[in-house]
């Protein structure tokens, strides 16, 4: 017959079983926390990547509206049948290298295009020829304003779309801070 298990052996066995159970629970908790941390880090990395992409878009050079409109009108008006006007429009830039006399000549050519070209041009092209002189003036004013923009104080207004977070508008002229 086998010898009976002593109290000391039995206590050691139970203590080892409890220790093994505690180590198992601690290990499981550690691995769960580590998995949660990894998931949170991945989520943060994805968010940072998205923000970097958005920041890159914000940092791209933005073409002012009138300059962009001028470029679109020039593209529509550039044709083989008006080489003098095409050369003048190429010099509109940005930056514009037209002298005042060249600019006056371009205005005359554009006016002729609106009235004297007949069926050679579309109504859209006729409208573009009528609009371009005004857009040229606006684009020049815009270019001058941008050239002096360094001297101007910029105002940045940031609005966040997070519910429950107060938004602070920091305006250079001492605006409200809701």
Image (spheres, rainbow, N blue to C red):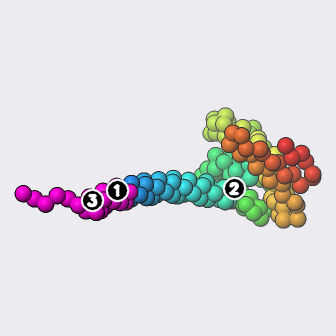
Q: Earlier in the sequence, mark 2 or mark 3?
A: 3
What is the spatial separation of the Cα atoms under label 3 and label 1, in whole angstroms? 16 Å
What is the spatial separation of the Cα atoms under label 2 and label 1, in whole angstroms? 68 Å
Image quadrant occupied by the C terminus: top right
Q: Residue at x 34, y 56 (%)?
A: 18
User: Would residue 15 be found to the left or right of residue 57 on screen?
Assistant: left
Q: Residue at x 84, y 58 (%)?
A: 154
* Label 1, residues with CA under 10 Å away: few <14, some 14-19, many ≥20: few
Residue mark closest to the camera, 2 vs 3: 3
Q: What SS does tag 2 mark?
A: loop
Residue 7's mark? Answer: 3
What is the spatial separation of the Cα atoms under label 2 and label 3, in whole angstroms? 84 Å
Residue mark closest to the camera, 2 vs 1: 1
The residue pinned by badge 1 equals 18
**As displayed, is residue 75 above or below residue 100?**
above
Q: Earlier in the sequence, mark 2 or mark 1?
A: 1
Please say whether residue 128 is visible from this viewpoint: no
Marks 2/3 in contact by CB < 8 Å: the verdict is no
Q: Which residues are magenta?
A: 1-24
Does the magenta-highlighted stretch encompass residue 64?
no
Image quadrant occupied by the N terminus: bottom left
Q: What SS does tag 1 mark?
A: helix
* Label 3, residues with CA under 10 Å away: few <14, some 14-19, many ≥20: few
The residue pinned by badge 2 equals 62
Q: Main secondary structure of the magenta part?
A: helix
């Amino acid at each position: 017959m086998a010898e009976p298990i002593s109290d000391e052996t039995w206590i050691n066995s139970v203590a080892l079983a409890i220790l093994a159970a505690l180590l198992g629970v601690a290990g499981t908790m550690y691995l769960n926390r580590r998995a949660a941390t990894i998931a949170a880090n991945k989520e943060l990395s994805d968010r940072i990547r998205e923000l970097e992409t958005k920041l890159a878009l914000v940092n791209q050079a933005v073409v002012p509206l009138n300059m962009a409109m001028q470029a679109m009108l020039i593209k529509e008006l550039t044709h083989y049948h008006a080489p003098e006007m095409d050369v003048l429009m190429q010099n509109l830039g940005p930056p514009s290298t037209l002298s005042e006399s060249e600019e006056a000549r371009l205005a005359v050519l554009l006016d002729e295009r609106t009235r004297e070209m007949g069926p050679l041009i579309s109504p859209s092209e006729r409208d573009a020829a009528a609009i371009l002189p005004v857009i040229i003036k606006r684009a020049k004013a815009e270019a001058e304003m941008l050239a002096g923009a360094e001297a101007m104080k910029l105002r940045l207004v940031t609005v966040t779309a997070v519910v429950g977070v107060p938004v602070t508008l920091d305006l250079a002229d001492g605006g409200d801070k809701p």
